[in-house]
Image (spheres, rainbow, N blue to C red):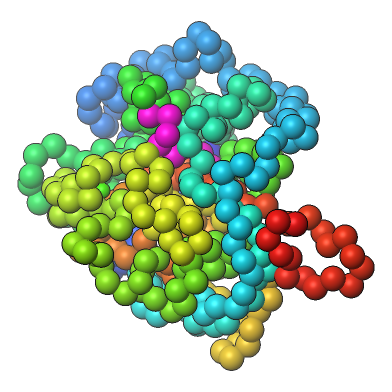
């Protein structure tokens, strides 16, 4: 977990107060605050019990001391496994085309200008990658996620080494129905030692019985490793948005312009007063198994809500394109820059999550953007993969591949 060492400053809280998007998502700087809070015994309950002695870790005997496993061996396994992956199983064809990308007045004001983009066709996972799929990957490769590794002391100067334990950020809303100030991340986000994709809510939780839910606590590096093993890749941001819109150009929602269809919720997000008065009108308090809500026009599920999804692009706070210009197969900027946290490498995330609320946040809309430090996961963050078609066999064939290549 490579984050700058930060403190919980009034300035940071002031930014959050005016930015609805930041209300719901811990930044890398604030993530550090959560780590320090957790490892200093400042948080309560089972989490605290796991950390104050500095001895508790997330691993069971079968998982071993993952922090000592060498990455190079794992990478070799990834390459070998890719050769045997059944690539297109569970994927749908997304035809290429031109669309209007972006959104005016997005929560972070970072999805402008709206501009035309052309993408070639590609295959895309029908659903978010599930726990079952990720378990197959780990079984085949021995891969260890970043959340399962002990944080590097150099990323947390001032924190005693013995206090640095593997873990991840977990949504932990306060008990009861009291109103919670929405400018204080620590009211609902906690760094939970032992939290990982195997234990989404902490050491005592399990993915058994939740195999069809999306895998979470995967950072960008983890998602890329899975994609490589599967012989796929992460989508570009443009591909992701084109796919999410499902052919409904310039619509507010993935499914059209109405918040609900026939009175039914069309995605897993948050209804009620955030963060601790969840009305669960859509049927799911937290994660939903993938595919429980209607697919979009391309047959893709959960392109809105459930979990955020990593994209391959570096994050910049606007689209560097002239109004009126059309970009073709854009792959994003050459480097990242988040003015809110300069120096933190961040990639784009898309689609929002089960925490997106109509009252406070519209990040589940197809044009809205998210971002995250590349080596940090959370309990509302996952991914899905894409696959480019095979190269045309006929010299001079067009760049728009046809289904069934
Ligand atoms: Ca929900
Ligand atoms: Ca999603």
Residue 144: x and y in percent read 59, 27
- Specify the quadrant of the image occupied by residue 260: bottom left
Query: Up-down: is 363 above or below 32?
Result: below
Question: Can you name the residue that lies furthest to the front here?
Answer: 404
Residue 72: x and y in percent read 75, 29
Question: Can you name the residue that lies furthest to the bottom here?
Answer: 324
Query: Up-down: is 152 above or below 88?
Result: above
* Left or right: 339 as drawn, with respect to 354: right
* Residue 286 visible in the snapshot: yes
Which image quadrant: the C terminus? Answer: bottom right
Write the residue at 34% across / 30% down: 201
Residue 175 among those drawn in magenta: no
* Residue 195 visible in the snapshot: no
Q: Nearer the viewer, residue 105 or 256?
A: 256
SS majority, magenta: loop
Residue 274: x and y in percent read 19, 53
Write the residue at 31% across / 51% down: 268
Write the residue at 48% across / 45% down: 128
Q: Nearer the viewer, residue 308 or 144?
A: 308
Query: Up-down: is 196 above or below 16?
Result: above
Residue 391: x and y in percent read 82, 59
Write the residue at 22% across / 58% down: 264
The range drawn in magenta is: 210-219
């Amino acid at each position: 977990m490579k984050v700058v060492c930060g403190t919980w400053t009034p300035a940071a809280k002031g930014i959050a107060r005016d930015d609805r998007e930041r209300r719901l998502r811990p930044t890398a700087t604030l993530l550090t605050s959560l780590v320090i809070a957790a490892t200093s015994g400042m948080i309560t309950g089972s989490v605290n019990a796991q950390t104050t002695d500095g001895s508790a870790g997330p691993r069971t005997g079968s998982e071993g001391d993952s922090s000592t496993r060498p990455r190079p061996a794992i990478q070799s396994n990834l390459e070998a496994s890719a050769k045997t992956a059944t690539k297109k199983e569970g994927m749908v064809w997304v035809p290429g085309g031109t669309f209007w990308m972006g959104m005016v007045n997005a929560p972070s004001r970072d999805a402008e200008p709206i501009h035309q983009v052309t993408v070639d066709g590609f295959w895309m996972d029908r659903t978010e990658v599930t726990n079952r799929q990720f378990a197959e990957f780990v079984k085949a490769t021995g891969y260890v996620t970043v959340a399962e590794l002990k944080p590097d002391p150099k990323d947390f100067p001032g924190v005693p080494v013995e206090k640095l334990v593997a873990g991840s950020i977990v949504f932990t809303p306060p008990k009861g129905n009291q109103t919670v100030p929405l400018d204080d991340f620590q009211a609902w986000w906690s760094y939970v030692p032992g939290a990982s994709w195997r234990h989404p809510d902490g050491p005592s939780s399990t993915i058994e019985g939740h195999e069809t839910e999306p895998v979470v606590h995967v950072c960008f590096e983890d998602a890329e490793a899975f994609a490589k093993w599967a012989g796929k890749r992460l989508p570009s941001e443009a591909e992701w948005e084109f796919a999410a819109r499902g052919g409904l150009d310039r619509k507010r929602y993935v499914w059209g312009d109405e918040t609900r269809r026939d009175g039914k919720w069309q995605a897993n997000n948050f209804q009620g007063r955030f963060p601790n008065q969840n009305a669960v009108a859509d049927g799911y308090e937290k994660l939903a198994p993938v595919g429980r809500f209607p697919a979009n026009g391309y047959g893709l599920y959960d392109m809105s809500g459930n979990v955020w999804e990593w994209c391959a692009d570096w994050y910049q706070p606007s689209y560097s394109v002239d109004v009126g210009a059309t970009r073709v197969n854009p792959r994003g900027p050459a480097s990242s820059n988040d003015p809110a946290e300069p120096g933190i490498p961040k990639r784009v995330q898309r689609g929002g999550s089960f925490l997106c609320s109509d009252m406070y946040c519209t990040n589940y809309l197809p044009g809205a953007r998210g971002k995250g430090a590349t080596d940090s996961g959370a309990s509302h963050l996952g991914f899905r993969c894409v696959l480019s078609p095979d190269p045309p066999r006929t010299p001079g064939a067009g760049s728009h591949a046809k289904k069934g290549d």
